[in-house]
Image (cartoon, rainbow, N blue to C red):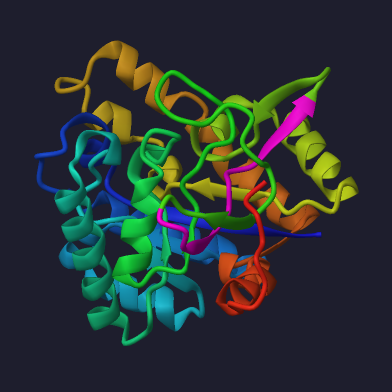
Amino acid sequence: MIHGFSVDVEDWFQTTIDASAQLTNRFQATTMKVLDVLHAHNTKATFFVLGLAARKAPNVVKEIARAGHEIQSHGFGHLSNLELNQAAIREDVSYAKMLLEDITGQEVYGYRAPFFSINESRMEVLDILIEAGYRYDSSIFPLKTRRYGIRGYSLKPHIVLTPSGKRIVEAPIACFDIFGMRLPLAGGGYFRFWPYWVIHKGFRQLDSKQQPAVVYIHPYEYDQTEMSYYKKRVSLLDRMHQGIGRKGIPWKISKLLHNFKFAPLKEVLSDLLARCQDRGSLISCK
């Protein structure tokens, strides 16, 4: 089974602590570390690049493209769609797309919402994405949490019928089952929290079901000293929550890339993308 590996390129402090803060330079160095790891394992991935990060470091975006990875949009300002009106969302996703296309010279047609902020109450965001020229989304967390997600949502990539009757491909974030309970495989903080044997078990389960997993990491998870840098500006609780497990991420990711097969989302979703453009076939979102 070929799974989808993705990287959300952003700066930790700006996206997690203070959305109004200037981006630091830390994400640039850690993004290069991620590129080195992927190269070492002969793996291509999808990089969902935040517009603010692209504007600050277009050279990093170009380096990602030169390495042969897929570049798609993480929006511009890392603001939750649950807190924005439709006009603000439209402006954010359109500007991010234009900026990335100007830098890379390549079409941008995939999107991941900040904070996975597309849920059952904001499905109209998918229509906004289609209007802006996007063809696939990877924002829906198929598990209800305190902050995001949709309970019972389909685990498999599929074609969604939007509120206006249009169609877009959705690639939900990976989950797996233990004792009848749906749990997040996902990536990010979940990869930091889970011991590797649990991650491995989740992938083996999805392999057996012939179900591709869509997982993600952030470059900042390769930054083991970041929490000490922000000691006086970030609460102890946030430092513990956001820093725990970073030390083990390089080993876990290398082990994962060695044990399982990964590709950019455009490859994992290629059949669905082709079918979505075929107006002669109607495919339900069930």
Residue at the spot 43% in from the left edge and 50% down from the top edge: 163
Left or right placement of residue 180 versus residue 154 in this view: right
* Viewer-closest of 202 and 256: 202
Q: How many marks?
A: 0
Q: Is residue 52 visible?
A: no
Q: Is residue 279 above or below residue 205?
A: below
Decide if residue 26 is in sight here.
yes
Image coords of residue 254 (percent x, y): 66, 51
Q: What residue lies at 62% left-to-right and 47% top-to-bottom? A: 253
> Vertically, is 68 above or below 234?
below
- Quarter containing the N terminus: bottom right
Query: What stretch of residues is rendered in magenta?
Result: 164-177
Name the spot of residue 138 as percent of width and height, x first.
50, 53
Residue 237 within the magenta-colored segment of the rendering:
no
Which is nearer the eye, 23 or 229? Answer: 23
Residue at 15% over, 52% down: 87
Q: Quadrant of residue 47?
A: bottom left
Of residue 18 and residue 147, the one placed in the foreground of this image is 147
Query: Where residue 122 appears, x then y in whole percent?
Result: 36, 39
Q: Furthest-bottom residue in view?
A: 105
Q: Residue pushed farthest right?
A: 208
Coordinates of residue 91 in the picture (x, y in percent): 16, 59
Residue 170 falls inside the magenta stretch: yes
